[in-house]
Image (cartoon, rainbow, N blue to C red):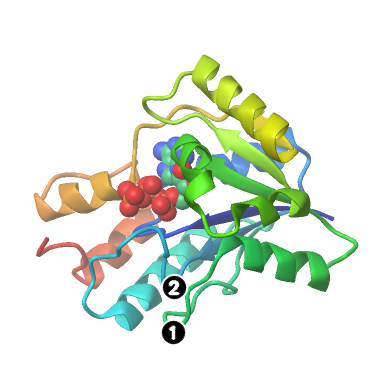
Amino acid sequence: MKIGIMGGTFDPIHIGHLLLGEFAYEDFGLDEIWFLPNGNPPHKETGEADKEAALAHRVEMVRIAVCDVPYFRLNLAEADTKKHSYTYSTMRKFTREYPEDEFFFILGADSLFSIEQWKFFREIFPTCTILAAMRDDKDAEEMKRQIRYLENTYNARIKLLQAPLVEISSTTIRNRIAENRSVRYMIPDIVERYIKEHNLYRGQ
Ligand code: ATP
């Protein structure tokens, strides 16, 4: 099988994430996309006092966002607040557990440009092909240059993922909710309902 890995904080999951998954699935003929909410993001602060509860909400929102799509799956390999999860070690675990399968790591431009700050990032490259999508301020030329640089320097395999350019981030969503503004069409309806029911992101 060809498996796409979509790691993230998903605080909350939004259509930018889902479009990346959908376009990677279709354009690269993948069989499954695994969404991996990170319990304790090493290069990002969640800003939540109660990490466990916050993780449970993030996981649940991913679950309800992907449950209708047969090739989208929630994967809990990184959903642990008690340890730091690093991509290199998760990917190594997957390639050992599933030696028959081929892995594709899906990420947005911001991640492609910061990947050299990730722990043991060199070890990620032999485990997968990276599918990198454009995002916000990076244009196609900058992306191609960064792809060439990483390929030449680290022997990485990286392909440009042509997904619609969506200027939405989880930060935008959280801010808009805190300001009582609409997030309709930016996140799945079911996630919007979940956020309302649990009164998330209100007091920020
Ligand atoms: P935050 O605003 O909290 O930083 P985020 O929207 O960047 O969150 P993450 O869960 O951190 O979301 O992102 C997971 C992955 O999805 C990253 O590789 C990121 O680059 C990518 N991504 C998220 N939103 C988009 C988008 N709108 N377009 C392209 N890539 C995206």
Which x, y percent locates residue 103? Answer: 75, 53
Q: Quadrant of residue 77?
A: bottom right
Neighbours of disc 2 within 10 Å: few (<14), some (14-19), many (20+): many
Q: Nearer the viewer, mark 1 or mark 2?
A: 1
- Pick the residue in front: 75 or 109: 109
Query: For residue 162, which numbered disc appears in the image?
Result: none
- The kind of residue on which mark 2 rests is Gly
> Can you say which quadrant of the picture contains the C terminus?
bottom left
Residue 16 rendering spot, x and y as whole percentages: 44, 41
Residue 31 visible? The answer is no
Q: Which amino acid lies under the numbered mark 1 shown in the image of this protein?
A: Lys
Query: CB of mark 1 within 8 Å of CB of mark 2?
Result: yes
- Residue 19 in the image: x percent, y percent? 52, 40
Tag 2 residue: 39
**Residue at coordinates 79% horizontally, 64% vertically from top-left?**
95
Dot 1 or dot 2, earlier in sequence: 2
Q: Position of residue 186 (x, y in %)?
A: 34, 42
In the rendered image, which residue does mark 1 sit on? 82
- Does label 2 point to a residue whose CB lies under 8 Å from ligand 1? no
In the image as oriented, which residue stretches furthest toward the front? 153
Give above or below for 187 relative to 86: above
SS assignment at label 2 = loop
Callout 1: 10 Å neighbours few (<14), some, many (20+)? Answer: few
Q: Which residue is rendered at x = 51% and y = 54% of the image?
A: 118
